[in-house]
Image (tube, helix red, strand yellow):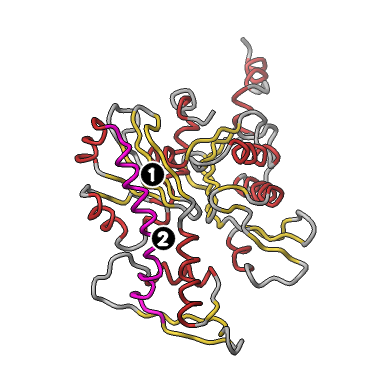
Amino acid sequence: MNNNKRDYLRFIPGKRLFNFFSNDMAIDLGTANTLVYMNDKVVLDEPSVVAVKSGTNQVLAAGHVAKEMLGKTPESIVACRPLRDGVIANFELAESMLRYFIKAAHNNRKFFRGPRMVIGVPSGITQVECRAVRDSAEQAGARPGEVFTITESLAAAIGAGLPVHDPCASMIIDIGGGTTEVAVISLKNIVFCKSIRVGGDEMDRAIVQYVKRKYNLLIGERTAELVKIRIGSVMLDGKTEVMPVKGRDQITGIPKTIQLNSAEVHESLLETIASIVELVRVALENTPPELASDLVDNGIVMAGGGSLLRGLDQLISKETGLPVRIAEDPLLCVVKGAGKVLKELDFFHEALMK
């Protein structure tokens, strides 16, 4: 074959050419953050917030820039979170945000063929909510008919490097912004999984309500999130940390600053943490005996941003009597797991949601 013919065949618009112009991607479409995994690395990690012109779907900003606008926009701009409790609350805004992130992940270059996608979703999602996720992805530019969904807990277990394909129990606790999932996994599939719509956002709201009730001070959820990250703790160790918190006095309407300590934050989180611990107990009670015995050796792995709350792993270990550890890169477990599934779709075919 002469060189000219060989060069011509090399550039026939076939699979390799499509792969070059279309980078498949895995997405963790979370309530708090959206992550995109492509070409074996995380290429985008942004808050799931979008700012649009009022009455339109014209995106003015998304991610970190839009998050800075929350609660500070004039009437002409709407900044909001299009996802609540792990599912899409506003279809149009979710689609606009997803399209914006997909273009950003591709550095705004055009592609001949839409990318295939694997998206992590909560296990408690309904068929209608799951369809909304797929439709949003396709409308945002994904390849029609090739948007796959996988439960976040299974994706997190794969991303955390657990031996999910072995005939032994792997238990994962995935605490995201909108949901907490506990799953027991064996042979590439879920044996038992339960999800509650309680997560990092619920912790933030609990802090907001506590400050409002005790100090008559109104603070925003962004402020509450900072409090949780800086001085939030599940188990008191005798060391008290203090943080200044600014808000608006409910009685006078005047801005005011109070000093909030770690013991008060601990008290505000008790009910939310109790819900998560109870969820773990329910999962253990529903685990078959042979698999339950594996957990004595294998223990429990925690993933998601909520797992970073100080002392939570120790509390769960104390309540269950099992070893508990936090996964390496807990914030990235779901998107990395979805990326592995995308690379081996045939191998993980049964793990995908039907």
Q: Which of the 4 quarters of the picture holds residue 270?
A: bottom left
The answer to whether 179 appears left or right of 108 in the picture is: left
Seen from the viewer's position, the closer of residues 291 and 187 is: 291
Q: Position of residue 140 (x, y in %)?
A: 68, 42
Magenta part of the protein: which range? Answer: 260-288
The C terminus: image quadrant: top right
Q: Amino acid at mark 2?
A: Thr
In the picture of the structure, the residue carrying the numbered disc 1 is 182
Question: Looking at the image, which residue is at 38% across and 44% down?
Answer: 182
Residue 272 is tagged as 2
Query: Which residue: 38% across, 51% down?
Result: 329
x 46%, y 28%: residue? 344
Q: CA distance from mark 2 to mark 1?
A: 15 Å
Q: Nearer the viewer, mark 2 or mark 1?
A: 2
Within 10 Å of disc 2 (Cα), the crowding (few <14, some 14-19, many 20+) is some
Which of 67 and 110 lies nearest the eye of the viewer?
A: 67
